[in-house]
Amino acid sequence: MDPDELLKTISSILEELDIPHVITGGFAISVWGQPRFTADIDVVVELVKKNIKPLAKKLLAIDKNVYVDEETMQDALVRESEFNFIHPDTGLKVDFFVTGGGIYDKLKIKRAIAKEMFGQKINFVSPEDLILSKLMWGRESDSFKQWADIKTVLKNKNLKLNMKYIAQWADRHNTLHILNRLLEEIKND
């Protein structure tokens, strides 16, 4: 199993179980910015308690040696945090980020953009919401990788980004100063 095959499988499972979700992280950067290698898949999910058992069952059926823990899934739901799926034979990992019930979390999933990949539609986070997510993740870690990823999306001439939307939410998330710094750096490149 390779990352593309796992992405397709995970997306199919979430669609089948009618779990709202978006693919984010490195795979989304490859869609909206500059492709880069990623050995993991990041998925934002709107999970409810009744979906935990069926999701765990489907994930465990992917292969005999996979790891996912139902108790950790329950904890992630309560804490609005993450749980992992690991395919040890290939080293592939899926990070499931369980959203809270906040307005922005719901909006991010609602604004998902389905892209045809590998013969099926896969829901990706919008480029604007990818930028906003990376701004928030980067603020926490001051990560050069996050800033570089944001710049590749901002520089993509094939995108018509809604900068008003980005600025509005960046202001709400207290990341507008970072966005402005990155935009200035792009101007000076």
Image (cartoon, helix red, strand yellow):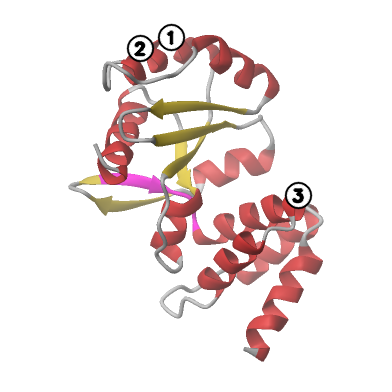
Q: Which secondary structure lies at badge 2?
A: helix
Label 3, secondary structure: give it. helix
For the residues labelled 1 and 2, the Cα–Cα distance comes to 6 Å
The structure residue drawn at horizontal position 47% and vertical position 76%, both measured from the top left corner, is 156
Using the numbered discs, state the Cα–Cα distance from disc 3 to disc 1 in whole angstroms.
32 Å
- What residue is pinned by disc 3? 140
Give residue 142's quadrant in the image. Answer: bottom right
Crowd class of label 3 (few under 14; some 14 to 19; many from 20; radius 10 Å): few
Number of the label disc, if any, that sits on residue 53: 1
Separation of residues labelled 2 and 3 (CA atoms): 33 Å
Q: Amino acid at mark 2?
A: Lys
Labelled pair 2, 3 in contact (Cβ < 8 Å): no
Predominant secondary structure, magenta span:
strand
Kind of residue at disc 3: Glu
Image quadrant where residue 15 sits = top left
Q: Which mark is residue 57?
A: 2
Compared with 157, 138 (above or below) is above
Which of the two discs, 3 and 1, labels the residue nearer the N terminus? 1
Q: Amino acid at mark 1?
A: Lys
Residue at the far bottom: name it. 188
Q: Is residue 50 magenta?
A: no
Q: Say if the magenta span includes residue 122.
A: yes
Q: Is residue 131 left or right of residue 67?
A: right
Q: Position of residue 3 (x, y in %)?
A: 32, 43
Disc 1 + disc 2, Cβ < 8 Å: yes
| Rendered residue at 41%/46% (across/down) | 39
Residue at 41% across, 19% down: 67
Give the image location of residue 66, x and y in percent. Answer: 35, 21
For the residues bearing labels 3 and 1, Cβ distance under 8 angstroms: no
- Magenta residues, as a range? 121-126
Observer-side mark, 2 or 3, equals 3
Residue 111 at x, y percent in the picture? 50, 49
